[in-house]
């Protein structure tokens, strides 16, 4: 006769409790903070940043922080198959009117893919997706982008900032640099920590 150990129910209960506690801990992870602003001072790994809203913020970068330069690039570099991010506002006809476009390096293909609200300005959106088609139009470049859940038609008016990310290093984290940090984390002591900082090159303010 098959005998079931009396310890099995206790073991299953323990595993269930671990899973529940793990899920609760995951759910309680603090939201990340998006920071746009100018570096005012650097003290070792601690950056003092004046945010675009005028708030003084202290951000500590990790030892292995990834620094990327944000540089201008020609709109002609947006080709079929490019993986891009589009900051935009929705138009009445359902298209997205681009406020800025950033072209991801190939190594970052698939990063944050999808369509979501964005905080560049009121009612703005962000679409990270692959270019399926691009053609010149009367109001600018018309781009069809596709992501896992769907697709968007984007109009890129003349003069829209077009940028890309280039490898950088910590030496670019200096007073006067314009930066965007997409996801700083707030630690238990209230400080902010970042493992990636994007720095505008040649005086550029990252437009996304």
Image: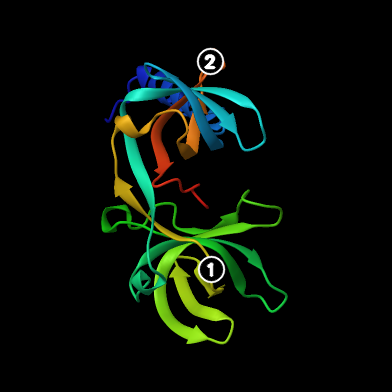
Q: For numbered disc 2, what is the local secondary structure?
A: loop
Residue with the mark numbered 1: 159
Total labels: the figure holds 2
User: Closer to us: mark 1 or mark 2?
Assistant: 1
- Residue sitting nearer the eye, 64 or 168: 168
Check contact, mark 1 vs mark 2: CB within 8 A. Answer: no
Q: Nearer the viewer, residue 186 or 55?
A: 55
Instruction: In the displayed orientation, state which residue is furthest to the top.
Output: 189
**Which residue position holds label 2?**
188
Disc sitting over residue 61 in the figure: none
In the rendered image, the vertical position of residue 21 relative to residue 71, given as above or below: above
Q: Residue at x 27, y 30 (%)?
A: 2
Q: Where does the image place residue 65, in percent across and percent down from the top left?
A: 33, 30
Q: Where 100 falls versus 63 (above or below)? A: below
Q: Picture coordinates of residue 61 (x, y %)?
A: 40, 25
Quadrant containing the N terminus is top left
Question: Quick check: can you spot residue 30?
Answer: no
Q: From the viewer's perspective, is 106 left or right of 158? A: left
Height in image: 202 above or below 115? above
**Residue shown at 35%/34% (left/top)?**
172
| Nearer the observer, 112 or 135 | 135
Q: Secondary structure at mark 1?
A: loop
Q: Is residue 63 left or right of residue 38?
A: left
Q: CA distance from mark 1 to mark 2?
A: 43 Å
Q: Residue 167 placed where, x, y %?
A: 27, 45
Residue 7 appears left or right of 162:
left
> Is there any visible trace of residue 184 in the rendered image?
yes
| Chain-order first, disc 1 or disc 2 | 1
For the residue carrying disc 2, how many other residues have a C-alpha within 10 Å: few (<14), some (14-19), or many (20+)? Answer: few
Q: Residues within 10 Å of mark 1 (few under 14, many from 20)?
A: few
Where residue 124 appears, as percent x and y from the top left, is: 65, 57
Q: In this image, 165 relative to 155: left or right?
A: left
């Amino acid at each position: 006769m098959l005998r079931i150990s009396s310890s099995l129910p206790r073991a299953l209960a323990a595993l269930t409790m671990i899973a529940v506690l793990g899920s609760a801990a995951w759910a309680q992870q603090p939201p990340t903070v998006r920071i746009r602003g100018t570096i005012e001072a650097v003290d070792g790994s601690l950056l003092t940043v004046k945010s675009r809203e005028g708030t003084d913020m202290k951000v500590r970068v990790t030892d292995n922080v990834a620094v990327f330069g944000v540089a201008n690039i020609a709109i002609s570099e947006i080709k079929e198959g490019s993986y891009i991010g589009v900051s935009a506002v929705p138009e009445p006809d359902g298209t997205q009117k681009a406020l800025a476009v950033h072209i991801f390096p190939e190594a970052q293909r698939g990063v944050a893919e999808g369509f979501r609200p964005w905080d560049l300005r009121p009612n703005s959106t962000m679409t990270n997706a692959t270019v399926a088609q691009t053609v010149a139009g009367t109001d600018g470049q018309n781009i069809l982008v596709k992501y896992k859940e769907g697709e968007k038609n984007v109009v890129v008016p003349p003069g829209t900032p077009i940028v890309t990310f280039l490898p950088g290093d910590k030496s670019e984290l200096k007073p006067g640099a314009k930066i965007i940090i997409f996801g700083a984390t707030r630690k238990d002591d209230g400080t902010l920590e970042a493992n990636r900082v994007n720095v505008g090159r040649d005086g550029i303010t990252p437009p996304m």
